Amino acid sequence: MEGLGKSYGEKLLFDDLSFEIRRGNRIVVLGSNGSGKSTLLKVLTGEEQPDTGDVAWAKGPGFVSYNQMLADLDDADTVSHAVNALPDSLAFSATRKSVNRFLAMFQFSEADLKQKIGNLSGGQKARVAMAQCLLSGASVLLLDEPTNHLDMSSTQVMERALVHFPGAVVVVSHDRFFSEKIANRHLVFGAVGAAPGEIDVRAA
Ligand SMILES: Nc1ncnc2c1ncn2[C@@H]1O[C@H](COP(=O)(O)OP(=O)(O)O)[C@@H](O)[C@H]1O
Ligand SMILES: [Mg+2]
């Protein structure tokens, strides 16, 4: 990310922001409400264009948006189908047994796998979307407040998945407990002493 800048009208969200995302980075994005965290994630995914600067992704498996996965879940689908029928899913080349073992780590029993997405709790849907993200083969996971309204055990599943993810993670979170476990880098909007639009990029 090189020289990124974005304003809405008079409101400057970020200016001349440069950083790299590298394998093993788990970047937690912090800042008050309305500071521009979600907009930054949208600029990374290409949903929003920056006013200045460029986003360049390395060739290869690319990124996946957890929030997009969650939004795209089909209520009429079963858990098992949602995970197995994902385009380019790593599940294609795995045995059913190993996929089920993988899903057991997301706390889905054999019986749960036959459930319709529409009948799942918020925590269960979150875990389906996270499982899909990991099976997508993407090398970067982008997540905007993934633990909002999640139960404790689903939050722990998310935490573990992110900490053990072999690629890179960029996650916006207000949940201190969660983000302290995940973060090895921080991107901080409006750090003390920062100029408007200045983002502090630092190690955790
Ligand atoms: N599409 C948009 N058009 C105009 N203003 C926007 C748009 N998206 C966000 N904003 C404004 O930009 C600011 C930052 O929003 P956002 O990135 O959602 O903040 P955060 O995620 O940090 O809470 C807010 O003041 C919000 O109202
Ligand atoms: Mg937001």
Image: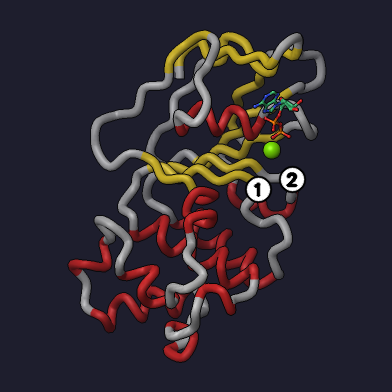
**What residue is at 61 percent from the left and 39 percent from the top?**
28
Q: Earlier in the sequence, mark 2 or mark 1?
A: 1
What coloring was used for the rendering?
Answer: secondary structure
Percent position (x, y) of residue 58? 29, 29
The quadrant of the rendering that contains the N terminus is: top left
**Residue tagged 2:** 174
On the question of residue 163 being in view, the answer is no
Ligand 2 within 8 Å, label 1 CB:
yes
Ligand 2 within 8 Å, label 2 CB:
no
**What residue is at 74 percent from the left and 49 percent from the top?**
176
The quadrant of the rendering that contains the C terminus is: top right
Percent position (x, y) of residue 43? 52, 26
**In front of the other: 85 or 65:** 85
**In front of the other: 71 or 186:** 71
Q: Nearer the viewer, mark 2 or mark 1?
A: 1
- Could you say whether the residue bearing mark 2 is in a helix, strand or loop? loop
**Residue tagged 1:** 145
Q: Could you tell me the amino acid type at mark 1?
A: Glu
Q: Are marks 2 and 1 in contact (CB under 8 Å)?
A: yes
Residue 54 horizontal side relative to residue 188, left or right: left
Single out the residue that lies furthest toward the front: 76
Percent position (x, y) of residue 170? 53, 40
**What residue is at 61 percent from the left and 44 percent from the top?**
144
Residue 174 horizontal side relative to residue 63, left or right: right
